[in-house]
Amino acid sequence: MSLIASLEEIELFEDSIFVMHEKCEKFIPFHKHSKSQLTYVEGGLGYIRFREKLHVIPARHYFWIPAGVEHTFTIGNPATKCRTLFFHTQGDSQNEFYNKVGFYPINDLLFQMIRFTEQWNAHALPGDERFVFLQSIKNILPQVSNQTLSAALPFTENERMLKILAYLEDNLPESHTLQSISSRFGVSERTLSRFFQSTLNVSFLQYLKLLRMAKAFRLIAGNEHSLADIAFLCGYQSLSAFSNTFYQVTKTRPSEHLMPVGTLI
């Protein structure tokens, strides 16, 4: 069952918890639903986009989306599996966690609980033993979701800016400055600086840093390059500089996202 095909089914029972385990579709267009959503990305890499930002979701991370929040979801690898629970919204007002979008690394307890639900694919209604177990997952989220992941790229539909962003992405290993990019696109540094602020609400340097982190996540998930090579491919001259910047943006080290040898997740 695809997510798009099941959107109507998810809405069938207001007080249920809906369970879905599947290989993710390559692209799920903008949509929203009346239930809150917990999705665990198992292997690969996911990209969740809201109207103004694109978030990178590495493997072994999950995200929480409150009911009614419009979003899209894209994956970088067709083999990526998503484990998704759609929760009723009763009691959400009692804890601020449930009312804001969040991205978090999985811990052992939550992973085992979510993995246990893979035997189910359907609604669990109050009074069902499955419901009690699933509700316990929701109940512990505020306590186990302490370390947030921040790797969000601002998004714009401005065609002129999209050309600049595409150039940066295609030439990421090179050294870029506000001066070099403004010269290439025939505008003044001041104009380009204002253009980034007006269309993306971030500075040129901050966007470049975020873009490099997004590529770093993709390369790490691909498991084909050493961290030293990834640093170079993302435009850094040393592994230490790359690691320090990665930590500034994500509050984690690149090595923490490497897939352990022999892991099942």
Image (cartoon, grey):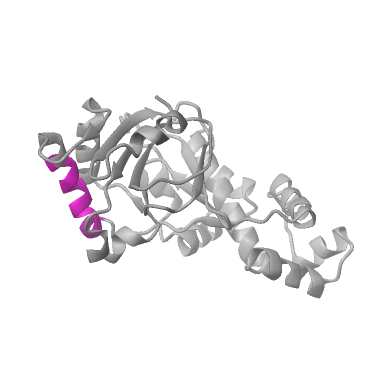
| Segment tinted magenta in the rendering | 132-144
Kindly report the secondary structure that dominates the magenta region of the rendered protein: helix
Which residue is drawn at the image coordinates 15% and 35% (left, top)? 130
Find out whether residue 93 is within the magenta segment.
Answer: no
Locate residue 129, reporting x and y percent: 10, 35
Q: Which image quarter: residue 9?
A: top left
Which residue is drawn at the image coordinates 19% and 53% (left, top)? 140
Locate residue 33, reporting x and y percent: 40, 45
Which residue is farthest bottom?
A: 190
Looking at the image, residue 35 lies above or below residue 83: below
Which residue is drawn at the image coordinates 44% and 31% (left, top)? 24
Which residue is farthest right?
A: 186
Which residue is drawn at the image coordinates 70% and 69% (left, top)? 198
Looking at the image, residue 157 lies above or below residue 4: below
On the picture, is 113 further left or further right than 160? left
Q: Along the line of sight, which residue is nearer the eye, 91 or 140?
A: 91
Locate residue 200, reporting x and y percent: 65, 63
Q: Which image quarter: residue 211?
A: bottom right
On the picture, is 223 further left or further right than 154? left
Q: Which image quarter: residue 97?
A: bottom left
On the picture, is 263 further left or further right than 179? left
Residue 125 showing in the rendered view = yes
**Quarter containing the C terminus:** top left
Residue 83 showing in the rendered view = no
Find out whether residue 138 is within the magenta segment.
Answer: yes
Total numbered labels: 0
Locate residue 233, reporting x and y percent: 63, 45
**Quarter containing the N terminus:** top left
Q: Along the line of sight, which residue is nearer the eye, 30 or 182?
A: 30
